[in-house]
Amino acid sequence: MHYEPSNVLLMTGRAAVIKRLMAIVERVDKVGDRSVVTVPLAYASAAEVVKLVTELTKDASKSAMPSLMVANLVADERTNSVLVSGEPNSRQRIIAMIKQLDREQAVQGNTKVIYLKYAKATDLVEVLTGVSTSIQSEQQNAKPAEALRKDITIKAHEQTNSLILTAAPDVMRDLEKVITQLDIRRAQVLVEAIIAEVQDADGLNLGIQWANKNAGVTQFTNTGLPITTAIAGANQYNQDGTVNSTLASALSSFNGIAAGFYQGNWAMLLTALSSSSKNDILATPSIVTLDNMEATFNVGQEVPVLSGSQTTSGDNIFNTVERKTVGIKLKVKPQINEGDSVLLEIEQEVSSVADAASSSSANLGATFNTRTVNNAVLVGSGETVVVGACWIKPSATARTRFRCWGISRCWAICSAPTANRFPSAT
């Protein structure tokens, strides 16, 4: 009898009989021919054939047959062939099964509809077309029947977001694997931004104006309150103590402090104003977008700009007006990298209409202020990064005065200087 776990034979009997049996076993128990045979396939897929044959022969491998007698199969997908090793009889039996499976199909191709869960069908058509082109290029030297079998058609149905594939079974399986790996839920990124203009704008307006009843006045209009206007209002001061319209109008348009006196023929007016402004938050946009998907934030208005003007024969003026969008624009494109880092491609623009244009360009239309930033930064999840800043430091000082020739230091008390500093960063 035999003992399967250790693959041994147990014999009992007379010594002469056991000796003869031992001689027979020694002649039989030898390493057989376990050569490897390559079976090329013309129509079937090597991986599928190995899977089917293994399924058919798995019961035989579990039987009382020794493992040395069972054939082994390996698929070589590169050459679309099957490698068979084992005893000659087992090899022949397996090879016969492989040849029966490797037959040309009656239908040269099949059609399948695949419904996508996350990806866009029209986007995948381009990718799958490129994959199928590479498959067809590998079959340029194939037999006509096989070349026909490799014809592939890929269409997208936008209404149901599905793909319609027509291809041979082996090609269909390759395309389905690609679709499964691409049709996944993409991560989303929340981008929170603060677009601010930081200023350190300090202004100082200080001036003294004099008037004499017999000699005249020293007037400076850039102080906000000319002395002639104040004198005119004071002369019309009502006897009952109420303020007249002339003085009220002059004082209503003035900012700061104004002080003066009138003594004899002399009058003096002192004006002073100091201003300071620090920063201004222009916008705090928040954008949620998919990984590798561009998102845009735009807030602004359209400003009319005169682009052309002509006069017709009837002295009618015909103007051509274009509109330019000004405001705040933010464009981001995130790319999630390994770990928790995100690569951000940022385009940001702040534009506005200038407060006042110079006299030489006033007739040409509005003047626009534009500040743009194009940048790419790598930032961790939840971290804050400063994309860019521009420090602008214009400084202007204006002094209006008259000089009294022959009178020492007269200019120092008869002047109206104005100084402004406007450094800013956006």
Image (cartoon, helix red, strand yellow):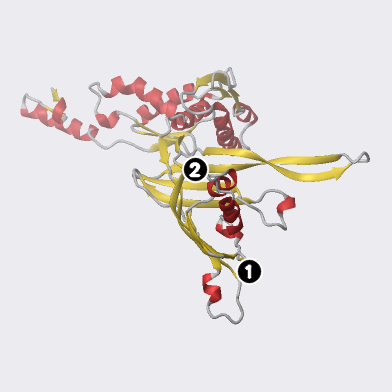
Q: Secondary structure at mark 1?
A: loop
The residue that disc 2 covers is: 332
Quarter of the view holding residue 5: top left
**In-image side of 316 versus 401 (left or right):** right
Residue located 6% across and 29% down the image = 15
Amino acid marked by disc 2? Val
The CA distance from mark 1 to mark 2 is 68 Å
Residue located 49% across and 43% down the image = 332
Q: Nearer the viewer, mark 1 or mark 2?
A: 1
* Location of residue 1 in the rendering, given as x and y in whole percent from the top left corner: 13, 22
Residue located 38% across and 29% down the image = 91
Q: Earlier in the sequence, mark 1 or mark 2?
A: 1
* Location of residue 352 in the rendering, given as x and y in whole percent from the top left corner: 59, 47
The residue that disc 1 covers is: 215
* Location of residue 267 in the rendering, given as x and y in whole percent from the top left corner: 54, 63
Q: Secondary structure at mark 2?
A: strand
Which of 109/356 is in front? Answer: 356
Quarter of the view holding residue 414: bottom right
For disc 2, the neighbor class at 10 Å (few under 14, some 14 to 19, many from 20) is many
Amino acid marked by disc 1? Ala
Residue located 54% across and 80% down the image = 408
**In-image side of 406 versus 14 (left or right):** right
Rendered position, 28 above or below 273: above
